[in-house]
Image (spheres, coloured by chain):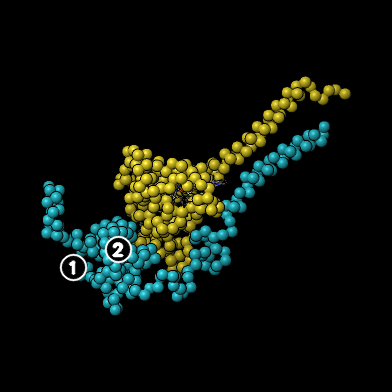
Amino acid sequence: MKSNQYQLTSLGLLCLICVTTLAACRQDMHDQPKYEPYEVSSFFDDKRTARNPVEGTIARGNLRADDHLYTGKVNGELATTFPFEVTREVLERGQERFGIYCAPCHSSIGDGNGMIAQRGGSSMKQPATYHSQQMRDMPVGHFFDVMTNGFGSMYSYSERISVRDRWAIAAYIRVLQMSQNASIEDVPAAQRQRLIMGEQ
Amino acid sequence: MPQIFTPAANTVAKASIVGGFLLVASLLSSVFYLGSTSYVTRQQDVRPQPVPFSHRHHVNQLGIDCRYCHTSVEESNFAGLPQTKTCMSCHSMVWTDAPMLEPVRESYATGESLEWVRVHDLPDYVYFNHSIHVNKGIGCESCHGAVNEMALMFQENSLQMMWCLECHRNPEAHIRDRADIYKFESQPDYDPPADQLALGEQLVRSYKVNKIQLEDCSICHR
């Protein structure tokens, strides 16, 4: 009789242990001994698991031999042409990227009156408008260069915007400059009528 | 010597057989139940961060796109967290001496990373990829909830397998036009479709969502 009770309690205890360990042991596979992106490392001094490549490393297909494409300069002078053909797709890509990275400060039409510029007010250096004569006369390479290296108080965007996207944005800035300085004569005759009707 | 067992003991013995099963079953189910409570999944739980960063402020009030900060969300499995330099691209000009932002300035000056505490974290045995979802028409809101209204970040959904499968079995109920991925229902420039299922079926076809394989164990457990 005594042993019967003893057996029952130990069976109960065993059940309980099984269930609780089952519930607990899964944590092992939850956090495996590998690094996830940006996880803190206890191995490196700066605690970063994301390592920079050794200085001078060139990944396959990333040899920056094309000066025009990668620096926006041709023979040391700011480029006046694009390194690849500007198609409608390139312009649309440029419009999208401009909206993400530039519009917060430069506004979606590029007059320099974006939300951050408004919030910053007089305490901050205001971004220049793209629609001055001086900016219209700038070679496109200048816009590429500003994005790549920064300009005055504006930071560089080279880590976040790929080279081709920077050219696409530069092309879109040209579109903005054209559209903000356009007259009715610039609209193809076929569409002109529609525009005039729409305005009424 | 008196009788130890009264006749009632027979009933007790029979009941204990059933009772034993019930006990084990209820223990097991309570383990499963506990596993899906927000205590375990840590839903709605705000973590202490080095800087109290507000998505509501930066997204809704300032209108900054998710990709300004989470740059790699379209191209890689990892959405990416902003470098200190990204914060400083604005905070070198606005709110330049707010005490709240001291850790950001210090990190920029010393080069030491800000250590954001992870809010969403799948177990390491699950493979997840942002780019495929974003490019096939699943918006941030479908998984992360109304980020644009979060003063502090928290996890909206359980992120358990059941939750992933609910959508993988029925993506029509969630899929959106690619132009609306970064928009939220509470924002004025987004109006949800009148008939989500009709639009959903059409988008699943035109985005070529590969529905057959979406329940295979091997796509998430590689």
Q: Where B11 sits versus A106, above or below?
A: above
Residue type at tag 1: Gln
Measure the alpha-carbon separation of dots 1 and 2.
22 Å
Q: Helix or strand or loop: what does disc 2 sit on?
A: helix
Residue drawn at the location 43% of the way across and 63% of the way down = B84
Amino acid type of disc 2? Answer: Ala
Q: Which residue in the protein does label 2 denote? A: A168
Disc 1 packing (10 Å; few <14; some 14–19; many ≥20):
few
Q: Position of residue B66 (x, y in %)?
A: 38, 54
Q: Quadrant of residue A11?
A: top right
Relative to the observer, which residue lies in front, A192 or A20?
A: A192
Q: Where does the image place residue B192, in percent across and percent down from the top left?
A: 33, 42
Camera-nearest residue between B55 and A185: A185
Which shade of the palette goes to chain B?
yellow
Residue at the (55%, 63%) spot, across then down: A41
Shown colour of chain A: cyan
Residue A154 placed where, x, y %? 32, 66
Residue at the extreme bottom of the image, as rendered = A75
Nearer-the-camera pick, A109 or A188: A188
Where is mark 1, residue-wise? A133
Q: Is residue B160 left or right of residue B92?
A: right
SS class, disc 1: helix
Q: Can residue B170 be seen?
A: yes
Query: Is A72 rendered above or below residue B201?
Result: below
